[in-house]
Image (spheres, rainbow, N blue to C red):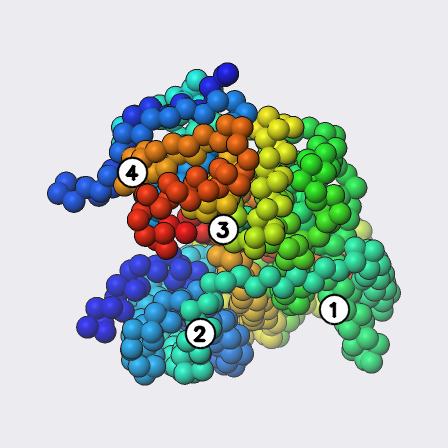
Amino acid sequence: METILAVEHLRRDYGRRGSVTRAVDDVSFTVAKGEFVGVMGASGSGKSTLLNCVATIDTPTAGHIRVEGRDVTAMKARELTRFRRERLGFVFQDCNLLDTLTAFENIALALTIRKTPPGEIEGRVRETAELLGLADCLNQYPYQLSGGQRQRTAAARAIITDPALVLADEPTGALDSKSAKLLLDRFEVLNRQRAATILMVTHDAFTASYCHRILFLQDGAIFSQLERGSRSRRDFFREIIGVVTALGGDQSDVL
Amino acid sequence: MFSKLAAKNVGRSVKDYGVWFLTIVFAVCLFYVFNALETQAVFQYLGSGPTAPTAQAIRELVGMLSVFVWVVLAFLILYASGFLIRRRKKELGTYLLLGMGRGQVARLLLLETAGMGLLALLVGLGLGVLAAWGLSAFTAGLFAVPMTMFTFSVSLPSLGKTALAFAAIFLLVMAYHAFAVSRCRLIDLMQAQRVNQELKSQSLGLSVALFLAGAALLAIAYAMLLTRGILRVDALFWVMIGLGSLGTLLFFRSLSGFLLRVCRSRKKLYYKNLNMFVLRQFNARINTTYRSMTVICLMLLLAVGITASAVGLNNTVEQMAAEELPQDANLVFYPDGEEPADLPALLAEGGFDPETECSFSLAFPVLRSDAGQAITQSVYDAFAGRWGQEAADSFLTREGLNVLADGEAQGAYVNYWYFLADYAGDKNAAETRFQEAVSTLGELGSYSCTTRLETWMELLGTKVLVVFMGLYLGVVFLLASAAVLALQQLTQAADNAPRYRILAQLGAPENMRARSVDIQVFLSFFLPLALALVHTAVGMTAVNQVIAEVGRVDAAASSAVAALLLLVVYGGYFLATCRASRRLARGG
């Protein structure tokens, strides 16, 4: 299997002399093409820092991050902007849609920014929207959409450019359980049909149970790793809960 | 402690204060320049001669006009202060949350306003003194005033008047701040950052219909203006103004929808870069901005129209003077005795020797003939040779003279004498000596004397009045509209910052975002200007019809001055707004 993402001995320190906080401490892992990987951990475990480093928004103190074999830690600012635009897709907790644009236009914007030929745009947007179950609400503004529809629009926007890697930061954080389930179902569809590689940060065990593999972070280091294999999601969910319990001792801190 | 915090606040929000500061500096500068008219070379010139009462009248008129200008500026500065308060709502909320009393917050704002106001006042006065000097040079050239009058001077009374006028405005601002702080609710202050998502989706079809209706109304108003002329102020005149204003309003109300409609059907344009975003942003704002756009468009019309008419009128008056009197000096002498008068010799005795003082002079008798009064053919030829056939003919018509062949003139009875001359060298010195020499002629007969400089001085009063009033009002309106636009755009840019953050996350490169900001600022600055220019073009056609009745129209000069003013004031604000908006869009 082709490796899309390779994180090698990643370290990220905050602060200066005397009071250094090590947010991420010697983390290494790889994500293969078509994998759906989750990162779990309590607040302050370093999962957001890790995601920001992979997203090239933050610069690591030491170590390397390779996406499709290219070392992003060695890229210059201009190159990085271009790289982010061409190879990465983002889904955020607060979906970050532009309120003045319709759902259709929000999705299309990702293409126009990449200077896609205008003739292709409408067809591709409709195709992707179909995949995410958005066909009926394309002409509505974000404030007219439900939270789940908004988050799926954001997902459509992230996926439409065929990125090498989709990064999702707590995508279900602001959704009710039904919308969350619908969104995750769509993530699975994207993952299967489009062979999209997804790296998702979450602290919700249910959300995480949709992943193929889960990395657990504690105090900036990988504490344990779980593979779903051929198990049912329910079994996988139980196992996740188990690790989470072992991790924190105090569940309320995690969930 | 308070002054320390105030000083820090000013330092930190110096960029927010930027447009506020710029507006006050410009306003102070303008107010001083026009109230310190006595420092103007052309005014010293006008005030020194027999035209002193005219100069005094003009100064009084400017004083009265300044009251009106003061009101406009006060509103402008209050508006700018309101903008600042809105920008800092969260900060003020934090002070209140931390337990500062409302009185204390008001005092803090008072200190800041006082400090910044004082600084702006000083800078503005400094600039004003320099600008008055520059304007003096400009108008001295415009009115061909001797450069000996052109000196650097400062008008202390005007400095005092300007300082007082703006101190009063600052007091108003402080009162407004105190009022704003006392009225605000903490919850509103803390949540002020939240962008309201009130988006009234309007039918694009309706926009197109409204747009066409607006265009039709404007066409009717234009047609009325061009057929009726601008000077007939009756009920229909107000109907015309009303139709024009309503048409302008409808135009801006529906323009964005219309544009959106047109662009959406052109996919190549719509799906290019951030065009989609720009158009949608523009369309989303139009509900709140179309009224101010209309007002700004009409203010620009006044600004450009007044400036252009004033300069146009000035040039027309000047041409009329030149046509009426082609010579520098024009002397008619009726001798008491019968013997022929040698005018050049008489003048030379009086201290004005035509041989050295004039580049050209012509002394000749007016003869009595059968057909009436006449001059000889050779005199006519000399006249036409120097001042042109046309001037010679109009001279004959004006004075009721015929031309006699040189032979027939022999021994004819001499009615009176003419002396026409163009000075050589320093015209003012020559004029003084000429007037002295002419006054000695009184013992020998009666005379009447007109010189170009005298006529000039009389006209100068009118011209100065027209040009200074025109520039004053024109610049004030221009300044007001540019400042209001700049503040609106900055407010919008601040509201748009989160949207640009999203665009950055989506990977839109910096230059693409900057371009989108520029386009938005450009649209809001130049759409009102474009329509205002069309209005002005039609209006000026009507004005020129009026001017054409009394003299020749010089459209080029008036357009050039208006364009220069627009470029400096409006263009300056546009660039400053672009820069500041880009900064707001970049700062994630």
Cα distance between the residues tagged 4 and 3: 21 Å
Residue ID for mark 2: B187
Q: How crowded is mark 3: few (under 14 residues within 10 Å), some or many (20 or more)?
A: some
Cα distance between the residues tagged 1 and 3: 52 Å
Task: Report the chain holding disc 4.
Answer: A
Task: Report the chain holding disc 3.
Answer: A
**In front: B21, or B160?**
B21
Local SS, label 1: helix
Q: Give x and y (percent) for residue B133.
A: 39, 60
Q: Please name the amino acid that badge 4 sits on.
A: Gly
Q: Can residue B353 be seen in this view?
A: no
Q: Are marks 2 and 3 in contact (CB under 8 Å)?
A: no
Same chain check for tags 1 and 3: no
Residue ID for mark 4: A220
Same chain check for tags 2 and 3: no
Q: Is residue A45 left or right of residue A168?
A: left
**In front: B384, or B555?**
B555
Residue ID for mark 3: A173
Q: Please name the amino acid that badge 2 sits on.
A: Ile
